[in-house]
Amino acid sequence: MNKYTEEVVEAVSAIHTARANALMVLVKTFNESGHLDPAHYAANIRMTIDANRNTIGPDARRLLLDIASSLEIGEDLGAA
């Protein structure tokens, strides 16, 4: 990979990581307030992936599965 390509890959990776972490914080907040069950949300993500197999690419599916798997870990990191 050339230097420009490496920089783009690093930038995309950073954006994905930041968004995924922000989403986890939002899910945790909604869960604490009693408005969202993370396991149910993860199941809905998986259902969406299956329903849209022909319209979303494998990379997007992999990222969505990563988010769904993170939601299912169930670690209790405490409350705000």
Image (cartoon, rainbow, N blue to C red):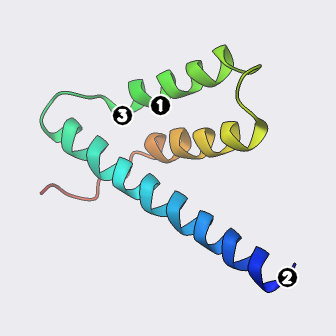
Q: Position of residue 3 (x, y in %)?
A: 78, 85
Taking 44 as reference, is 50 left or right?
right
Q: Is residue 12 above or below residue 1?
A: above
Q: Nearer the viewer, mark 2 or mark 3?
A: 2
Report, in whole angstroms, how far the alpha carbon at label 1 lies from the one at label 3. Answer: 6 Å
Taking 58 as reference, is 47 left or right?
left
Residue 58 image-quadrant placement: top right
- The residue drawn where x is 63% and y is 25% is 49
Report, in whole angstroms, how far the alpha carbon at label 2 lies from the one at label 1. Answer: 37 Å
Q: Position of residue 62 (x, y in %)?
A: 69, 43
37 or 6: nearer the viewer = 6
Mark 1 is on which residue type? Answer: Ala
- The residue drawn where x is 52% and y is 38% is 68
* Direction front: furthest residue: 4
* Direction right: furthest residue: 1
Report, in whole angstroms, how far the alpha carbon at label 2 lies from the one at label 3. Answer: 40 Å
- The residue drawn where x is 44% and y is 62% is 18
Q: Are marks 1 and 3 in contact (CB under 8 Å)?
A: yes
- Mark 1: which secondary structure? helix
**For mark 2, what is the residue?**
2
Mark 3 is on which residue type? Answer: Pro
**For mark 1, what is the residue?**
42
Q: Which of the two labelled residues, at mark 2 and mark 3, occupies the earlier sequence position?
A: 2
Q: Position of residue 30 (x, y in %)?
A: 21, 37
Name the mark on residue 38.
3
- The residue drawn where x is 40% and y is 24% is 40
Residue 12 image-quadrant placement: bottom right
Taking 65 as reference, is 30 left or right?
left
